[in-house]
Image (tube, rainbow, N blue to C red):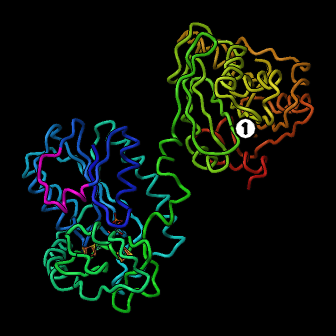
Amino acid sequence: MVYYYSATGNTRYAAELIARQLGTGCADLLGRIKNADYSDIRSDEPFVICAPVYVCMMPGFVYSYLERTAMKGSRKVYFVFTSGGYAGMSGSQAKALMQRKGMDYMGHAEIKMPANHIVSDAYPPTPDDECRRRILAARRQCREIAAVIKCGGRLTARHVFAAEKAIIMPFNPVWTRFCQPSRDFHVTDRCTGCGKCARVCPLNNITMTDRRPVWSSPCAHCMACICGCPREAIEYGDITQHKQKYNILKYVKNMPLDEPAELFRGGTAHINGTEIYYTVCGRGRPLIMLHGNGEDHSIFDSAVSVLRTHFTCICPDTRGHGKSAPVKEYHYADMAKDVTALIDHLGLEDVVLFGFSDGGISALMAAARDERIGTLIVGGANTDPEGIKLNSRILFDMEWMFTRDPRLALMSNEPHITREELARIRARTLVLAGEKDLITEEHTRNIAAAIPRARLKILRGEDHGSYIVHSRKIARIIERFMKVK
Ligand SMILES: Cc1cc2nc3c(=O)[nH]c(=O)nc-3n(C[C@H](O)[C@H](O)[C@H](O)COP(=O)(O)O)c2cc1C
Ligand code: SF4
Ligand code: SF4
C-alpha cells in the first residue's frame, strides 16, 4: 500500500505511478492529518510512504502523524521523497523514526520535481521546460523505484554528510518557526468563496468567513491553498502576483496518470498452439520488434525508450525464448506464423515490422504473406544458412555439437527463402547489415535486390548486433526511415 501527502501534486503523482506499477492501492493522508485521525494504517505488502521535502526535512506534520500512527501488517517500509533537488535529511529522519517504531527500513528514494515554494524569492520558480523535463524524468524514476520494491530490493539515495546535518538541524526549526508567516496571504476579487483552500490546508489554518478565506497560524507554507485555488485568487504579499501558481496538473493534463502502467502493458497471446509473451510500450503506429536467436525482447530496451514517442512498440519473446512457452522444435516458418497470429490477436493494421537476425528471417517470411505489414526493416538477416560467413557457421556447428541446443540447429539448417518469396513482399523495406556482420555483404545485397521496394544500408564500423542490441542507434535509423524525425 502506498500512502502519501502532497500539497501541489508532485508527490501524489509519484505515489500514484508507483502504486500502479506495483498493482497496489494508494491512499492520501490529507484527511487523516487534518482530522488528527491516528487510527492504524495497514499494508499487507511493504509500506511505501511518499512525502515532499520541506526545508531539507520531512514536513513536520507528516512526521508527527507517522510518529503517532501504528503501522499494521508488513514490517517493511520504503520512503519516497519529492523535492526541488535537495532532500537533505529527510531519509535519515525517516530511517530513525521507522527504526524506533520497530519497522524494517528498506531505504528511500529522492525524486527531483519542480519546486513549488512560490512565496519566497529565495527559491526561483522552475522554468516551464524544466518542469516538463523533471516530470518526465520522474516518471522513469518511479518505474525504477517500483521495480526495486517489487523484487524486495532496498532503495538507495545520496549519502548525507555530517556537516550537512550540522547545518540543517538548527536551520530547519528556525526557518519553520520564523520564516513561514501566514499574515501575508490575501485574497483578490476573483475569489468565489468555494472553500477549497480551507479544505486542502493540512493544518486547518484557513477558516471561511463571509465566504472569504481567513488565515491563522502556524502555517507550513505548504502551498496547497495558494497553488490549489481554482480561481488563482490567492496572493502572498507582493511576491506572487506575477508568478505562476505551481500545480503539477498544468503539466500532466495531456499525460494520463496511468500512462506509464499502460506504456509497459503487455501480456501473453495464446496463438498457434503456444504462448507468446509480449510487451507493449508507447503510442502511435504499431511497430513489432523481433529479437534474434537466444535473446528476448529486452535487447530493445534502449531503442524502445526512444521509439515509444512515435510508435506503439510491441516486443514479443519469440517462441521458445524469454517468457514465451518452451517448444521442442524451432522453425522460422512457425515464428513467421506467430507474427501474423500476433497481428490478428492485437487487431493491428499498417504494421511496421522490424526483425534482427533470426527475427529478421521471420520478418521477411511474415511480410511475404501478410499485407498488413506496411513497412519492413530487417537487420542482419539471411535467407539461407550459406549467407552466414564460413567461420561463424563452423562456430555455430561446434557449439551445437557440445550443447545440442535446438536453436543452434535452426541456424545451421534453415532458412531457405526463395527469391520468388522475397519478390512477393509489398512493404516498403529497409535491409540493414553491419560492415563487420556475420552475414556476407553479398548475401545482404541480394536480399535487398530481390525485394521490390527495398533500400539497402550497410553500416560502417558496425558488426552483427552492435547497432541494435541495447542500442539507440537502431531507433534513430528507424525514425529516419519512417521520417518521424
Ligand atoms: C515549505 C517548503 C519547503 C521546501 N523545501 C525544499 C527543500 O529544502 N529542498 C528542496 O529541494 N525542495 C524544497 N521544496 C520544494 C518541494 O519539496 C517540492 O516542490 C515537492 O515536490 C512538492 O511536493 P508536492 O507537490 O507533493 O507538494 C520545498 C517546498 C515547500 C513548500
Ligand atoms: S479556493 Fe480560491 S476561490 Fe475558493 S475560497 Fe479559496 S481563495 Fe476563494
Ligand atoms: S495556510 Fe499554510 S499550511 Fe495551510 S494550505 Fe496554506 S500554505 Fe499550507
Q: Quadrant of the C terminus?
A: bottom right
Quick check: 473 above or below 81? above
Where's the N terminus, which quadrant?
Answer: top left
> Image check: 8 left or right of 307?
left
Residue 63, x across and y down, in percent: 16, 62
- In terms of secondary structure, where does tag 1 sit? strand
Q: Residue at x 40, y 65 (%)?
A: 113
Q: Position of residue 376 (x, y in %)?
A: 78, 34
Residue 475's x, y, as percent?
A: 67, 46
Q: Nearer the viewer, residue 383 or 316?
A: 316
Name which residue lies at 36% across and 57% down: 12
Q: Is residue 33 magenta?
A: yes
Q: Position of residue 422 (x, y in %)?
A: 87, 24
Q: What is the residue that sits farthest to the front in this orientation? A: 210
Q: Is residue 194 above or below residue 328?
A: below
Circle 1 is placed at which residue position? 436
Q: Is residue 377 left or right of residue 205?
A: right
Q: Is residue 175 above or below residue 139?
A: below
Most foreground residue, 415 or 106: 106
Tell me if residue 181 is in the magenta stretch: no
Q: Nearer the viewer, residue 481 or 18?
A: 18
- Residue 278 sits in quarter: top right
Query: Compared with residue 443, is residue 84 higher up or lower down, i.e. above or below?
Result: below
Q: Is residue 71 left or right of residue 275?
A: left
* Magenta span of residues: 29-41
Q: Residue at x 35, y 84 (%)?
A: 187
Q: Residues within 10 Å of mark 1 (few under 14, many from 20)?
A: some
Most distant residue in the bottom direction: 238
